[in-house]
Amino acid sequence: MATRRISSLLSRPSLFSYTAASLRSFGRYSSWGRGVSKFSTAVAFEEPITPPVQIDYTQLLINGQFVDAASGKTFTTLDPRTGDVIAHVAEGEAEDVNRAVSAARKAFDEGPWPRMTPYERSRIMLRFADLLEKHNDEIAALETWDNGKPYEQAANTEVPMLTRLIRYYAGWADKIHGLTVPADGLHHVQILHEPIGVAGQIIPWNFPLLMYAWKVGPALACGNTVVLKTAEQTPLSALYVSKLFHEAGLPPGVLNVVSGFGPTAGAALASHMDVDKLAFTGSTDTGKIVLGLAAKSNLKPVTLELGGKSPFIVCEDADIDKAVELAHFALFFNQGQCCCAGSRTFVHERVYDEFLEKAKARALNRVVGDPFKKGVEQGPQIDSEQFEKILKYIRFGVESGATLESGGERFGSKGYYIQPTVFSNVQDDMLIAKDEIFGPVQTILKFKDLDEVVQRANNTRYGLAAGVFTQNIDTANTLMRALRAGSVWINCFDIFDAAIPFGGYKMSGQGREKGIYSLNNYLQVKAVVTPLKNPAWL
């Protein structure tokens, strides 16, 4: 699923129920907290709830075994609710990446994974999905504790989506096939689709488990082996679920997990000469570095899912109440820490004032607090760096002349909570309208007509996603074709079915993840030509 990520390189339903649609849309019409005003501090100032899970795995996972870092070093992973230490985690560096790549290479060159039948690979992945379902609540608790996202979101949406994605890719394992093609002559031509080899993968902190599935799922379904580098802010859930993968029968060395920092572990993986393919989710600036390291080493192919500054366009015919709720979700979901967040809310001038007042009221009614508490919509930001960055952008907004309608300050006195913030009178040249803030800051801009809003919406270096809210099919058709973005959601937002490809235009990345398109990232194409003698047909 971007500043989340600069430090990442170089650096069974649960207690609560969502609707079935939420498994696809992340709860796009959530109405939690209505009637609670001005970010009620009751939940934030209580003692933090003790997470219902224990930390069992903090070492590196190499060749099927949990091991210490070669240096013996560890780093702390922190609870964003308080800033307190959750655990000390093995700090992988270049030597550990070498060990992990060697294990992955041996598993690919000599091991059973690429040589077993695709059906058997599928069965192992399906057993893994069953274990994910069985341990849904523990996994969700780890994710919330380490990341700060609401437990209800993790337990009822994200972990079930992880399970669904693994089952989706398990289904693909025995359906990957080549082609035969006619030739202009007496030759038989086969096109083989082969696993590419050792895949290096670097995932972010904002959706650790979903990004795990987006990358590990297609790579393993195609018969590759993997070295996964987790974000240093959120190493715990990937280690836990990877242990479950081995319980499901995954052979040693097929999936290796290295926790550590970007300049050491991340850079070593990106530049490793024995890694055949690299996939990275992170910021655009870091993506450039990743691409450079890959090119300077062995010219390995790279898939990049990078930053965004996505427009959310509210047309004059919109149902304003629904549009306000959807725009609120598009921006504030996951504490605003979402690469495709609808972070530029364009509203037609005829409905702007009504939309603004209702958007402000919705932000004031948003429930902020301990993410383990039922009914909380917004937890803390990931860490102090992101917390300070968001507050800096809020100051930039005020200083540049935008009107601060709500929020704008720290929430509570402990942890990394920020008030849901709304700006009006935002101009395109303001930093809050150009840069990826990656936080709970909604900027609301006014437009006059479709030609204008298309030009302004596309006037960005990003092109990851866009949202359109209209009741007019002609307007929808015009905008969906004119907007230069990899995903355009019409009267919905953040629909992430397993089969829907995701990726960006321009500097939002290259390649696509999810769906059939993601398989291409992990396959080589080989042409095999054989002479024919006296063929009965051509």
Image: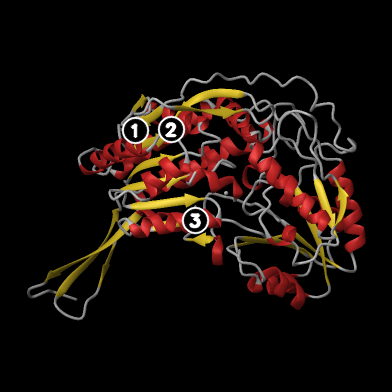
Amino acid type of the residue that numbered disc 3 sits on in the rendered structure: Gly
Residue 505 in sight here = no
Q: Residue at x 48, y 46 (%)?
A: 9
Q: Secondary structure at mark 1?
A: loop
Q: Can you identify the residue that label 3 sits on?
A: 287
Q: Position of residue 118 (x, y in %)?
A: 31, 44
Q: Residues within 10 Å of mark 3 (few under 14, many from 20)?
A: many
Q: Nearer the viewer, mark 3 or mark 2?
A: 3
Q: Can you identify the residue that label 1 sits on?
A: 250
Instruction: Give left or right: position of 135 versus 249.
Output: right
Is disc 2 in contact with disc 1, using a CB cutoff of under 8 Å? yes
Q: Can you identify the residue that label 2 sits on?
A: 128
How are the residues colored?
A: secondary structure
Q: State the CA–CA distance, disc 2 to disc 1.
A: 9 Å
Q: Residue at x 62, y 46 (%)?
A: 24
Q: Residues within 10 Å of mark 1 (few under 14, many from 20)?
A: many
Amino acid type of the residue that numbered disc 1 sits on in the rendered structure: Leu
Q: State the CA–CA distance, disc 3 to disc 2.
A: 31 Å
Q: Position of residue 287 (x, y in %)?
A: 49, 56
Q: Residue at x 21, y 43 (%)?
A: 109
- The outermost residue toward the front is 399
Amino acid type of the residue that numbered disc 2 sits on in the rendered structure: Phe
Residue 123 or 313: which is nearer the viewer? 313
Q: Secondary structure at mark 3?
A: helix
Q: Residues within 10 Å of mark 2 (few under 14, many from 20)?
A: many
Is disc 3 in contact with disc 1, using a CB cutoff of under 8 Å? no
Instruction: Give left or right: position of 239 versus 345.
Output: left
